[in-house]
Image: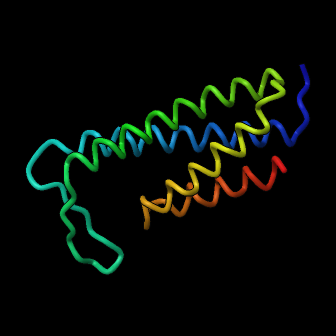
Amino acid sequence: MNRPVGVSIVVVLIVISAVFDLIVGTWMILSIFGSNPTFTDHLGNSQEVSGFYLFISGLLSVVLGLMYFWLAKMTLIGSATAHMLIVVLSAINAFYGLFRLPYGWGIILVSLLIIVMVN
């Protein structure tokens, strides 16, 4: 089956976003082990983060990544509901990327690009 080029580009962007979410989510879940999980903010200050926040945030990121893979499959088969789901999940992912700043800029840009291309 031949898909339009725009649909293929959207699927590639969705898969990139899914892989990023899975990697970051797994990294956040695994980072709770050890003593005092910390990160360095954009000003160079060391900030301590609770393990519960990291686990829940990582788990949500992994679930969102798996939903994106499911959405890519739906898009490739030509589902009628895929358009709405792409917009909703991309908006959720862009909003969720705000909580991962300064590392979330890339996923925010990819999510906004997906929304623009779908609409």
Which quadrant, please, contains the N terminus? top right
Relative to 22, is 36 above or below? below
Relative horizontal placement of residue 45, taking residue 22 as reference (left or right)? left
Question: Which residue occupies 50% across, 54% down?
Answer: 96
Residue placed furthest toward the bottom? 43
Q: Residue at x 57, y 31 (%)?
A: 67
Q: Quadrant of residue 55?
A: top left
Type of colouring: rainbow
Residue 41 location, quadrant: bottom left
Vertical relation: 2 (above or below) 7 = above
Q: Residue at x 69, y 24 (%)?
A: 73
Give x and y (percent) for residue 57: 36, 46
Residue 88 horizontal side relative to residue 37, left or right: right
Q: Residue 32, relative to residue 39: is it above or below? A: above
Q: Is 101 left or right of 56, judged from the image as shown?
A: right
All told, the count of numbered labels is 0
**Residue 11's spot in the image, x, y percent?**
73, 36
- Residue drawn at x 63%, y 43% is 89
Question: Relative to 79, is 114 above or below?
Answer: below
Tell me residue 105's x, y (percent).
53, 63
Q: Quadrant of residue 47?
A: bottom left
